[in-house]
Amino acid sequence: MSVNELDGEIGFMTHGENRTDWLGFAVSDAGDVNDDNIDDFAVSALNHDGGGEDAGAVYVIFGTEQGFNTNLDLSTLDGSNGFMIMGEATEDQFGHSISNVGDINGDGVNELAMMANEAETPGLVDNGITYVMFGRQSYPAVVSLSTFDGSHGGFTIHGKFAGDRASDVSSAGNFNADNFNDLIIGTQAHDPGVTNAGAAYVIFGTDQGFPAILDLGDINGTNGVAFWGENGGDIAGYKVSGAGDIGGDGSGDVMIAAIKESSHATQSGAVYMVFGKRQQWPAAISLDMLDGNNGYKLTGEEEFNLLGLALSGSSDINNDGKDDVLIAARFNNPDSTSYYQAYIIFGKDNTMAPSQSIDVVADLLIKTPSIPSSSPYNFDAGFVGNLNGDNIPDLAIGDPYNSEVGNYSGAVYVVYGSQTFVSTELLTDQLSDTEGFKILGGNWNDRLGSAISTAGDVNHDGIDDLLLGAHMTDNTDTDAGSAYILFGNDVIFADAFEASQ
C-alpha cells in the first residue's frame, strides 16, 4: 500500500507548515500526555524557524475517538487537540530526538523528552540540551520551554562539555528498581579521556522533584549514572534505548550503541546491554567493565556494519512472556545486494558471555534490500505494538532509499510478531501476506522509513497504530516534510496487502 491511500478511515497524514521544516525527522508515541486515557503522539520539525533559524519544533497531537481528517493541519492545534513547542535559539535543532519516557515524577501522567542536540548553554558550544516536559491535563496552543522550572512545565538537562552533542533520548524503564521510570540520554561526542568515545547517562525518576537545570556533570550515582565509551571514536550513545527486562531480574535494562566501535572489525560497531539493578550506583562506569553479570557487549559481524543504527526493546515479539530486543545494522556488499538488517534477540534466562558477535546470539534476522548509500544513518527500525490485532507485538523496518515510486521515495516493511517464525532469516521483499506487508512512500525523495514508531492507540479502538516520518516530502512546500499515521486493524491490513499484489 501507499501512504497516499490514507484517507481518514485507515489513517491520516500531517505536513510541515513551512519550506525545509523537515517535519517527521523524529517521531514518537507520547503516551497519554494529557491524562484523558487516550494515547497521544509527537512529531518533530527539525529545521522549523519559529524560534530562530533552524531552532526546531515539536508538535504533540492528542488522540481522540472522534476521528481525524485525512490531512491534519498543524496550524489548527489550539491546546484542545494538541500543541506546539518551539526551540529556543537559532540552530538548536530542537526535536533531533523525542521519546515517551513514562512517568518519571510519580504523578501518574507520562512525560515527554525532547532533545536539542546542538543547543548551547553559557560558556559551552554544542553541548546539547534535553527538555523533559511533565504530562498534565491542559496545555496552551504553544508551550514555552522557558516555563520549564523543575516544578511547572518540566526541567532541562544540559550536556557536560562543549561539543558533547546530545544524540538520542529514550525511556530506560525502571532501571534502578525503585518503582519510578527512568530515562537515558546519549552524548555521542563526549570525551571521557579519549576523543569521541561517547557516553550515555541514565537519569533516575523521583517524586522528590527535579531542579530546573540538571547538569550531566552533576550525575553522582544517587540521581543517575554515567556510562563511558571504551575507545576514542566509538561514539557510544549514538543510539540508546530501554531494553525491557532482558536480564529477567525485575529491573529495567538499557542498550547503548557505539556504531563505530572497532574491536571486531573496522567500524563493525557494538551495542552494550547494561542490566539495571537496585543498588547504590557509582557516578560513572566504563562500558569495558561489563562482565556478563552486569551486562554484556555485542559486536557487529563485519567491517562498517555500524551495529546499533537503530535500537528497540520492551516487546515480546515471539509471545513467550519475555522481553525481546531489536538491534539494526547495515551490510554493504559492493559486489551484490546491500541490506539494512534487524537482529532480534529473544529474552532468555541463561547467562551471556561478556562479549559476543551479534550473529551468534541473534534468534531472528530480518534483511531489507537497500541501495548502497554514502549516508546510511538516516534509517530507523523498531517494535511498533500490536498492529494486526493478534495480541502479539509487531516490528517495522525502514528503507528510505527504496525507489519503487521515485528515486529515494522510501518504504517501510511491517513484520508481524509470531509464536513460530517460519525461518530464522526473513527477507522483507519476500514477505507473504501472513508475515507482513509493505508501505511505499508517496513521491520522489520523500525518504519514508527514516523515522518509525508506534503511535500507541490514538483512535482508541483497542489496536495499536503506526507512526512514520518522511522528512523530505514536498506536499506543502520543498522539504516541508510529513508524518503518516496508519491505524491498526485486523481486517484492513490484510485487504490492503492483497490489493497491492
Image (tube, grey):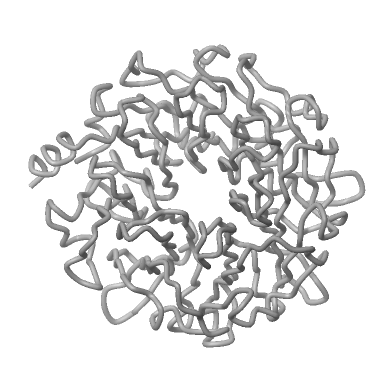
Residue positioned most to the right:
123
| x, y percent for residue 428 | 23, 61
Q: Is residue 313 left or right of residue 278?
A: left
Q: Is residue 12 left or right of residue 353?
A: left
Report the front residue among 331 and 453.
453
Report the front residue among 30 and 413.
30
Q: Is residue 140 above or below residue 484?
A: above
At horizontal 29% and vertical 40% (from top left) the residue drawn is 443
| x, y percent for residue 181 | 63, 45
At horizontal 68% and vertical 35% (from top left) the residue drawn is 106
| x, y percent for residue 308 | 51, 67
Residue positioned most to the bottom:
264
Image quadrant in which the N terminus is located: top left
Q: How many marks?
A: 0
Q: Is residue 417 above or below residue 157?
A: below
Q: Is residue 121 left or right of residue 315?
A: right
Q: Is residue 134 above or below residue 96?
A: above
- Image quarter of residue 99: top right
- Image quarter of residue 72: top left
| x, y percent for residue 204 | 73, 50
At horizontal 40% and vertical 55% (from top left) the residue drawn is 381
Report the front residue among 94 and 242.
242
- Image quarter of residue 132: top right
At horizontal 53% and vertical 12% (from top left) the residue drawn is 80
